[in-house]
Image: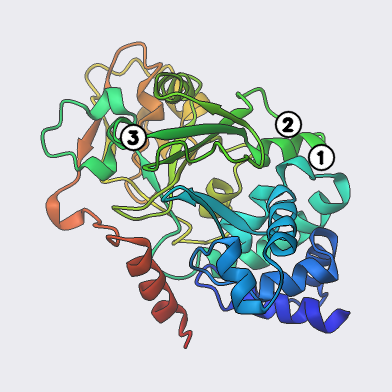
């Protein structure tokens, strides 16, 4: 029984995102908590590319309905990834983060939370230790909409305008912290999934609820007002599927970027905040209440933006009483161009990690 879970752990670690082994074996305990032996075996027989139940059944030599029933059960339990494309439900493997762990939103309990809290420092060294970054910060639309040179993949509203299906889920990071008694007051419904496929979430959804484009745009606007950071997953120009609206008090990726020396956990936006010293009233709102990265510092009675730690989210601008903070597009030489597709991201990441 232990061997199947070790094999599952090794398979997850061979994915570009990683799932490193530890001396304590906490990663095996996590997998045993999430998977049965039968589910682990099925996961090991799936591919990273999506397949229908018929395709999986034919490949494994099993009855179609029996295979479909198991795959649907695993999807409901968050043990694999699934989507609807070209009118059919499809199933595939998924990394632990972002992926399997987030899918545990309906099964999260204190035991799993404690195990994951123990494991995250180890996971973040791999997840955030290799280029390209997993996620990418998107600046607040209202702040950068006048910039004629903003790329479509850097504009959160532009991404949603071309999508056709939407669903909203609770933030697992805030739910995790609430279980630990360390919850915050930010909105819980904050993880927005979207797809270019019509009716992508109509077969069934793991959690959350299906919404329309209008509500999706409203959620993005409310999240910005609430001081949340738009984090696009994945860091690609095409094929992304989610925007997490993150807070520094709970978000695992923001905390990893800030505390765990994980430089490739999140790519900064192509913007940077600047403060007009002549207009600044030195109220401290931006530094003490808004900036998620502690990137605004005081020197000789004046606030400055630390360009090394600013992620270009624009959260500091929302409540500035003197409107003395702006987001400016970085010089072209300092701008980062993400991989074009998920396939490109996979290949670059695997090469960076030295995977065969």
Is 221 situated left or right of 104 in this image?
Answer: left
275 shown above or below 283:
below
Nearer to the camera, 305 or 310? 310
Quarter of the image that includes the N terminus: bottom right
- Estimate how packed mark 3 is, as few (under 14), some (14 to 19) or many (20 or more) residues with alpha carbons within 10 Å: many
Q: Does residue 113 show up?
A: yes
Tell me where residue 348 appears, x and y as whole percent: 36, 73
Q: What residue would you read off at disc 1?
A: 180
Residue at horizontal 46%, vertical 85%?
A: 354
Tell me where residue 68 appears, x and y as whole percent: 68, 58
- Estimate how packed mark 2 is, as few (under 14), some (14 to 19) or many (20 or more) residues with alpha carbons within 10 Å: some
Q: Is disc 3 in contact with disc 1, using a CB cutoff of under 8 Å?
A: no
Marks 3, 1: nearer the viewer: 3
Quadrant of the rendered image containing residue 100: bottom right
Q: What residue would you read off at disc 2?
A: 183
Residue that sits furthest to the left in the current view: 148
Q: Is disc 2 in contact with disc 1, using a CB cutoff of under 8 Å?
A: yes
Q: Does residue 301 show up?
A: no
Q: Earlier in the sequence, mark 2 or mark 3?
A: 3
SS state under label 2: loop
Nearer to the camera, 239 or 50? 50
Tell me where residue 168 appears, x and y as whole percent: 55, 31
56 shown above or below 266:
below
Q: Which mark is residue 156?
A: 3
- Estimate how packed mark 1 is, as few (under 14), some (14 to 19) or many (20 or more) residues with alpha carbons within 10 Å: some
């Amino acid at each position: 029984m232990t061997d199947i879970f070790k094999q599952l752990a090794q398979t997850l670690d061979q994915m570009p995102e990683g799932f490193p082994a530890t001396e304590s074996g906490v990663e095996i305990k996590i997998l045993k908590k999430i998977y049965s032996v039968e589910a682990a075996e099925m996961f090991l027989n799936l591919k990273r590319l999506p397949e229908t139940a018929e395709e999986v059944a034919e490949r494994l030599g099993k009855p179609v309905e029996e295979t479909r029933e198991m795959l649907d059960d695993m999807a409901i339990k968050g043990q694999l990834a699934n989507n609807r494309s070209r009118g059919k439900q499809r199933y595939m493997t998924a990394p632990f983060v972002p992926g399997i762990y987030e899918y545990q939103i309906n099964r999260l309990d204190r035991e799993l939370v404690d195990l994951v809290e123990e494991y995250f420092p180890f996971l973040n060294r791999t997840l955030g230790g290799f280029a390209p970054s997993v996620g990418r910060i998107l600046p607040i639309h209202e702040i950068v909409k006048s910039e004629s040179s903003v790329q479509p993949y850097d504009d959160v509203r532009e991404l949603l305008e071309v999508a056709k299906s939407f669903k909203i889920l609770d933030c697992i990071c805030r739910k995790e912290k609430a279980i630990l008694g360390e919850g915050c007051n930010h909105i819980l419904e904050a993880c927005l999934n979207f797809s270019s496929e019509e009716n992508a979430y109509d077969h069934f959804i793991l959690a959350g609820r299906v919404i329309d484009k209008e509500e999706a745009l409203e959620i993005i606007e409310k999240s910005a007002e609430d001081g949340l950071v738009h984090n696009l997953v994945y860091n690609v120009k095409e094929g992304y599927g989610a925007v997490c609206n993150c807070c520094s008090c709970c978000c695992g990726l923001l905390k990893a970027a800030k505390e765990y020396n994980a430089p490739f956990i999140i790519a900064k936006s192509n913007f940077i905040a600047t403060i007009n010293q002549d207009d600044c009233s030195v109220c401290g709102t931006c530094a003490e209440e808004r900036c998620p990265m502690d990137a605004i510092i005081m020197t000789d009675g004046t606030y400055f933006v630390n360009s090394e730690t600013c992620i270009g989210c624009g959260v500091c601008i929302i409540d500035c009483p003197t409107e003395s903070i702006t987001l400016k597009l970085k010089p072209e030489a300092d701008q980062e161009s993400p991989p074009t597709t998920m396939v490109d991201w996979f290949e670059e990441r695997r090469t960076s990690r030295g995977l065969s």
